[in-house]
Amino acid sequence: MNKHHFYIIPLKKDDHIKYLFRVQLASSGDPLASCSDHHSCIPKEGGHKMTGPLSALQLKKQRASQQAGQLFRTGHVAQQASTMTHLENQVAAALALKSSQEYKFWLLTYMRYLVQEGVEAKIREVCDELLGPVYKSKTASSWESHTLGLGKRHLLQEILPIVGSNLRFQRLFTEYKEQLDTAKL
């Protein structure tokens, strides 16, 4: 990690070319975090206080971001976009840090927000990735059944009640629940 809180991750070394990507883990002036409205999707009960490497890096900026978010309100579309991007960044940062506890926390928070906002395309995107192929095929699949030691289908099983909590997504809930049941056979 460099002085600007960017985590540099090597991806591939091919013919002396090194491909890298970077994830910003913490920044006191992060406009996405400041405009994000994800706090309403974090469960208040159950002591969901995060204690991982990502939380340690972001602890200092959290209070300032919440206060700035209250001061600077944006339009709904801009706030929704910044919140979704912020939550996607949190999931990516937890993956980069290989923090399974924080990955699960931010993924569930992201899904709660998507369901609350009614963003069906993104809900389907996440559910499809977690479900993977329902039937085994002869061709090799690039889908991995686990992320950071967490079973993707088990995560989907935890996410489905969140999806089903919104009456608008009852059909989506049923669709993925049936596919998940079929995949388990």
Image (cartoon, helix red, strand yellow):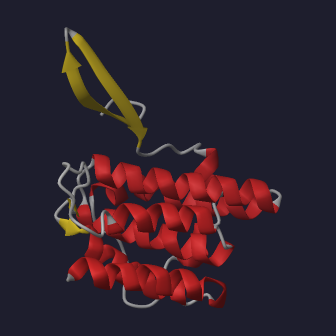
Q: Position of residue 173 (x, y in %)?
A: 50, 84
Above or below residue 145? Residue 46 is below
Q: What residue is rendered at 43% in x and 79% in y?
A: 176
Q: Position of residue 78 (x, y in %)?
A: 76, 53
* Residue 15 figure quarter: top left
Q: What residue is rendered at 53% in x and 68% in y?
A: 123
Q: Position of residue 51 (x, y in %)?
A: 29, 67
* Residue 135 figure quarter: bottom left
Can you say which quadrant of the picture contains the C terminus? bottom left
Q: What residue is rendered at 30% in x and 52% in y?
A: 95
Q: Residue furthest top?
A: 16
As rendered, which of 63 and 9 lies closer to the eye? Answer: 9
As rendered, which of 176 and 168 lies closer to the eye? Answer: 176
Q: Is residue 116 left or right of residue 73?
A: left
Q: Residue furthest front?
A: 138
User: Is residue 142 something that shows in the picture?
Assistant: yes
Q: Position of residue 25 (x, y in %)?
A: 41, 45
Q: What residue is rendered at 51% in x and 66% in y?
A: 124
Q: Is residue 64 left or right of residue 71?
A: left
